[in-house]
């Protein structure tokens, strides 16, 4: 029986985008929201600034009252004080501090450094041009009450936190983080705390996937290991799938007689695809149902890390924001070529800005050489010789 044809990288992305469902939202305290994704815009509860704000320490006055004799101080206003009022006499002035409410009747501010004070008299220094509206941050000039200041789907960072706090949002609505499980497979693998025998390896893939997700802001809720005994492990696999939103499996998905994962997954979910024209990571597959998505990554370490970076992280980001993220672009530091039918994920190190130097990886198990790299460049199939000036999608290990 002829195996089904491999699907392309473009087809994989289109299929993954088609199953993205916006998650439910939850309200959490603002001080716990960093790194989460906004489920609704943050709106202003009042104008910004909420009053005519003084922008410089100095003196508030009426610009039309400018005269060589100077001004007479009649009061003082600081940030946090209530609205002061400028005197009714021509030449009256109020001493003001940055952030204070502009006194009623004033329409300009003269900074301290352009004045000379003698008692209660203020004179402007020669060379200063007094103009109306000078050094005043007018009410509502930044935004109006009711304006949306952020978009839904925005990751919450320090700026978004400051905006929310300014607008009185002690809690914010965010997309509920997915419950993520990581499963490694293989009888040859032992816990990292154990000393392996000569025919064994330590379990590194689950840790690598967990680190990849954590750097992107996603914390796995569960991580465990499955043996190659399908009859024994099927129930554990089923229980893990039912308890999580996104499940990432490493290994056991190729054509070997002990690769039982694809057949088992077919009992629990719909096979979206299995087998992609990409290198490394050809056996990659995804299964899904109405509630969850299961990523099956090859067990070779380079394939696992590349697959988690290229596919799992963008999917989780799109699930949170509603939009598949556009990857940054990078340029090869030298010529490269790809005459084959497979999209190639080329490990690279950044040598200057967004200029990327290819790093030779001997095989998909050679993760030690990845230490010198920063991520992967996606080189299209049948692209022939690629000039250094050609922009290519770049997927960094650290988003």
Image (cartoon, rainbow, N blue to C red):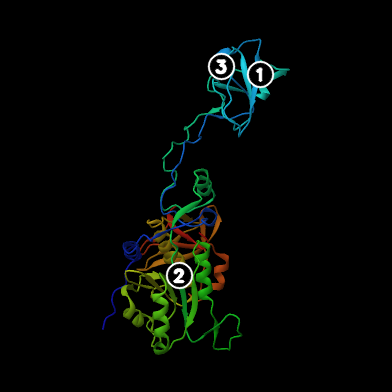
Q: Which residue lies under the disc numbered 3?
A: 63
Tags 1 and 2 touching, CB below 8 Å? no
Residue 5 can be seen, yes or no: yes
Q: CA distance from mark 1 to mark 2?
A: 66 Å
Q: Describe the element under mark 3 as helix, strand or loop.
A: helix
| Residue mark closest to the camera, 3 vs 1 | 1
Q: Residue furthest left?
A: 1
Tags 2 and 3 touching, CB below 8 Å? no
Number of the label disc, if any, that sits on residue 44: none
Disc on the earlier residue, 2 or 3: 3
Residue 253 can be seen, yes or no: no
Q: Nearer the viewer, residue 112 or 200?
A: 112
Q: CA distance from mark 2 to mark 3?
A: 64 Å
Q: Nearer the viewer, residue 366 or 219?
A: 219
Q: Position of residue 134 (x, y in %)?
A: 55, 23
Number of the label disc, if any, that sits on residue 180: 2
Q: Which residue lies under the disc numbered 1?
A: 73
Q: Position of residue 61 (x, y in %)?
A: 59, 19
Q: Describe the element under mark 2 as helix, strand or loop.
A: strand
- Whether residue 227 is situated above or below residue 48 in the rendered picture: below
Residue drawn where x is 54% and y is 86% of the image: 200
- The answer to whether residue 282 is left or right of residue 374 is left
Mark 3 Cα within 10 Å, few/some/many (few <14, many 20+)? some
Quadrant of the image containing the N terminus? bottom left
Disc on the earlier residue, 1 or 2: 1
Quarter where residue 54 is shown: top right
- Whether residue 42 is situated above or below residue 288 in the rendered picture: above
- The answer to whether residue 86 is left or right of residue 288 is right
Disc on the earlier residue, 3 or 1: 3
Mark 2 Cα within 10 Å, few/some/many (few <14, many 20+)? many
- Whether residue 217 is situated above or below residue 142 in the rendered picture: below
């Amino acid at each position: 029986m002829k195996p089904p044809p491999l699907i392309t990288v473009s087809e994989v992305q289109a299929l993954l985008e088609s199953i993205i469902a916006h998650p439910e939202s939850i309200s959490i305290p603002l001080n716990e929201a960093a790194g989460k994704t906004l489920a609704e815009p943050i709106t202003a509860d009042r104008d910004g600034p909420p009053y005519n704000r003084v922008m410089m320490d100095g003196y508030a006055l009426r610009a039309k009252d400018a005269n060589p004799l100077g001004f007479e101080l009649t009061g003082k206003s600081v940030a946090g004080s209530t609205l002061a009022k400028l005197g009714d006499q021509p030449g009256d002035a109020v001493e003001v501090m940055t952030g204070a409410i502009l006194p009623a009747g004033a329409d300009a501010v003269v900074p301290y450094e352009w004045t000379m004070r003698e008692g209660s008299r203020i004179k402007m220094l020669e060379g200063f041009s007094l103009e109306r509206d000078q050094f005043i941050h007018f009410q509502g000039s930044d935004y109006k009450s009711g304006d949306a200041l952020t978009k839904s789907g925005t990751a919450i960072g320090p700026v978004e936190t400051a905006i929310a706090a300014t607008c009185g949002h002690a809690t914010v609505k965010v997309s509920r983080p997915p419950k993520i499980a990581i499963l490694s497979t293989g009888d040859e693998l032992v816990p990292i705390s154990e000393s392996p025998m000569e025919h064994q390896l330590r379990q590194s893939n689950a840790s690598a996937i967990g680190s990849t997700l954590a750097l992107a802001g996603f914390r796995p809720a569960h991580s465990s290991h499955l043996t190659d005994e399908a009859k024994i492990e099927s129930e554990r696999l089923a229980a893990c799938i039912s308890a999580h939103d996104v499940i990432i499996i490493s290994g056991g998905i190729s054509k070997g007689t002990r690769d039982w994962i694809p057949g088992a997954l077919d009992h629990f979910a719909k096979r979206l695809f299995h087998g992609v024209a990409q290198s490394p990571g050809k056996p990659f597959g995804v299964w899904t149902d109405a509630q969850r998505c299961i990523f099956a990554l090859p067990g070779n370490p380079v394939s696992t890390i590349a697959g988690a970076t290229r596919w799992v992280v963008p999917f989780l980001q799109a699930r949170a924001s509603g939009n598949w993220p556009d990857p940054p672009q990078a340029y090869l530091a030298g010529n490269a070529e790809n005459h084959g039918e497979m999209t190639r994920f080329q490990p690279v190190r950044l040598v200057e800005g967004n200029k990327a130097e290819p790093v030779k990886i001997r095989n998909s198990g050679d993760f030690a050489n990845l230490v010198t790299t920063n991520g992967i460049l996606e080189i299209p199939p049948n692209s022939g010789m690629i000039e250094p000036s050609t922009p290519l999608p770049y997927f960094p290990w650290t988003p």
